Amino acid sequence: MSFAQEVGLNSLSPKYIEILGPKYVELYNQNIVGKFLAHQVSMKENRQNPVIAGLGGEPGPAIGRIWDTKIPVKEPEGEITLRVYEPKELGEKEEKPVYINFHGGGWCIGGIGDDEPFIRHVVDRLGVIVIDVGYRLAPEFRFPVPLEDCWTAFEYIRTHASQFRINPSQIAVGGFSAGGHISAILSHRARDKGIQAIVFALIVIPVTDANALDEELFIRRDSPYKSWTEHHDGPFLSYHRMSYFYRYFLPASGITSSFLASPLLSPIHQTNFKSLPPTLVAVAEVDVLRDEGLAYARKMREEGDGWVQCWLARNVPHPFPHQYKATERAVEFRELAIKRLAEAFKGELKGKHWETNVDVEPKIAGTKAETVTQETAAAGKVGYGGN
């Protein structure tokens, strides 16, 4: 297969035309219709033609120096790249707060630089340093390697503060999609290890519960997340695309329900939600991952003791934070995220706090939502090519 044009391929389902509005429909029709998507081609072709994340994006403002450095990682041994974004004016002995960014891409595609427009706005507006982590990708490096790489990067940055001219007690972590998943995992891990350096977590359109799917990576009949069936054919991130990423990311064998529900993989199944950093969880309404993201935020509220905001971006699909030209929600999210980062670095997000724009909340994982139909649950295994 290739990304050659094919008339009618991946046309937008009629039910989404009114929901998304004319700008998104135009963006989708111009860039998606007639092309093969991630789950329809090999990983090699997918990486050579990343057609989704940056659609409708913008370059972002001018900032100071941008430079790369490599750090060692283990299990297996190797190295990864960190990209450092500095503000225009940075004193030689000045220590800045740092936002550590983990990119999305289903743990399989993408890389440092994918979130650069957002990163540039953070650096420009707040005068902080941002470090983007180029963790190793599946299927060459399956679970848990991408997560371990990110933890290693976090620890390296924290313990080499002078190299990056950062304040090691003012660290924020965050990311979109797989990056949001990684940020949630790291927030719990740092807390468990007694590391109190994380002052904020930005968890955006995250994966929080792999157990939403069964052992064969079909939608679970007893899934508590309505969004998996409601938007199984959703634009930009469908069930087929998400299960494709899971098939490459998770171990090639030995997948069980208990494994999928492991808190090391699915942060919503953590048993302790206390003493986590202040957190903004942002989700997209037209997204298979919507309800597990909302449920994660709600669990933080009900079982935690910290500052939590849950923000739902209405009428937009999964990659909306990148798509400034298609939706005002991208700008709204960016402004909210920058505001919360600024407040966190000033120490203003304290105590137990809950804030949300969601009027109807999903049930927490472990309860039963409406029945998934046989047709939807058995929508067919994803077809994909070799590496």
Image (cartoon, rainbow, N blue to C red):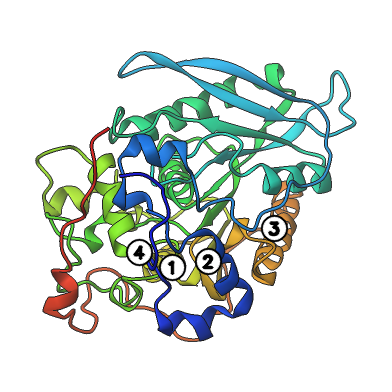
Give the Cα distance between marks 1 and 3.
29 Å
| Residue type of the residue flagged with mark 1 | Pro
Query: Could you tell me if the residues under marks 1 and 4 are in contact, i.e. CB atoms within 8 Å?
Result: yes
Compared to residue 248, the image places residue 145 above or below, namely above
Residue 238 is tagged as 4
Residue 32 is tagged as none
**In percent of the image, x 38 and y 38: which residue is there?**
45
Q: Nearer the viewer, mark 1 or mark 3?
A: 1
Give the Cα distance between marks 1 and 2.
8 Å
Image coordinates of residue 353 in percent, x first then y, are 58, 68
Image coordinates of residue 333 in percent, x first then y, are 66, 64
| Residue type of the residue flagged with mark 4 | Ser
In this picture, residue 295 sits left or right of residue 170: left
Residue, disc 1: 235
Query: Tag 1's secondary structure?
Result: loop
Mark 1 or 2, nearer chain start? 2
Give the Cα distance between marks 3 and 4.
30 Å
Residue, disc 3: 340
Query: Could you tell me if the residues under marks 1 and 2 are in contact, i.e. CB atoms within 8 Å?
Result: yes
In this picture, residue 13 sits left or right of residue 347: left
The local crowd at label 3, few if under 14, some if 14 to 19, many if 20 or more residues have their Cα within 10 Å, is: many
**In percent of the image, x 66 and y 54: which residue is there?**
57
| Residue type of the residue flagged with mark 3 | Arg
Compared to residue 42, the image places residue 35 above or below, namely below
Residue 28 is tagged as 2
192 or 214, nearer to the observer: 214
Q: Nearer the viewer, mark 1 or mark 2?
A: 2
**In percent of the image, x 52 and y 16: which residue is there?**
71
* Res. 368 image quadrant: bottom left
Query: Tag 2's secondary structure?
Result: helix
